[in-house]
Image: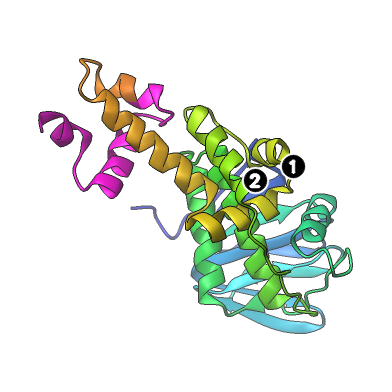
Amino acid sequence: MRNKTSEHVKIWRTEAIQGVEFMRARYRSHRFSRHFHEGFCLGVIEDGALGFRYCGENLLAPTGSVNLAVPGEVHDGHGADESGWAYRMFYMDAKSLTSAMSELFPQVPSFLHFKPGVLHDPHLARLVQGLHQDLEAGHLSTLEAQTRFLGLLTTWIGRHADDRPVLPGLRPEPRAIALAREIIEDRYAEDLSLQALAQETAKSPFHLARIFAAQHGMPPHAYQTQVRVNRAAAQLSSPASLADIAAATGFADQSHLTRWFKRYRGVTPGQYRKI
């Protein structure tokens, strides 16, 4: 168990989500000087409480809350008491996020405003924390990382932007969905990106993800995982090792295959092989 009295910081990026920097940190006595960011900052408090002055107010972000800072808004940061705080943060490039916003909500202005620096939204907090943890663990496919990130942005903007934009309605698009399914089934072992899949179907990434989930009952990355499990099951009658089957069907490793196989089939690959 990590010592809560120590301070540590981890910062990284991933190819799957461009224009975003990720940070996980624990601070005890550190105090941030007054500063601003050129992009958007969105995070979740995992332990303790963060105090900061933002938009002329002294704010407190307790455990489980979401903290937010918009480009150019000066703020500081410090522990609410001597125990400090721990949090996970998304630092998002303003240009990239503005482009994503125009895709998510095409009927609203290109730049949305957010006033509160602390959001008490348990659902959004779970999305932020869950995606951040999974990205740090490094076992997400590009398709899943990108789809979940767009879903996170949609929830955040739709619930907390000043104008509260509404997603446009959907109409059935069976041809696009059939083509997307065909591509996933043919290239199931590849690390497909949502952008590549959208380009093949002549749709925007976010729109494709929405219509796929609406018409098929699961997002594209979940469908890809289901296909991989099915292909792995078909190979279990061969003498190939579980590690080789995992690699051949697009899983990160044998444990990754086992985890998803058990979720979909109710038994492990080893148990299924014996059957």
**Which of the two labelled residues, at mark 2 and mark 1, occupies the earlier sequence position?**
2
Query: Where's residue 8, x and y in %?
Result: 53, 50
Query: Where's residue 47, x and y in %?
Result: 47, 67
Q: Relative to the observer, which residue lies in front, 272 or 155?
A: 272
Q: Residue furthest bottom?
A: 57
**Image disc number at residue 141:** none
Residues in magenta? 246-275
Tell me whether circle 2 and circle 1 mark residues in contact (CB < 8 Å): yes
Secondary structure at badge 1 equals loop
Specify the quadrant that holds the C terminus: top left
Which secondary structure is most common in the magenta stretch? helix
Q: How is the image coloured?
A: rainbow
Q: Which residue is mark 2?
A: 176
The amino acid on which the numbered mark 1 sits, given as a three-letter code, is: Ala
Q: Is residue 249 left or right of residue 173?
A: left
The amino acid on which the numbered mark 2 sits, given as a three-letter code, is: Ala
Magenta-span inclusion, residue 49? no
> Which residue is drawn at the image coordinates 78% and 60% (left, top)?
101
Query: Where's residue 200, x and y in %?
Result: 69, 35
Secondary structure at badge 2 equals helix
Q: Which residue is mark 1?
A: 202
Seen in the picture, residue 221 relative to 232 is either above or below; the reply is below
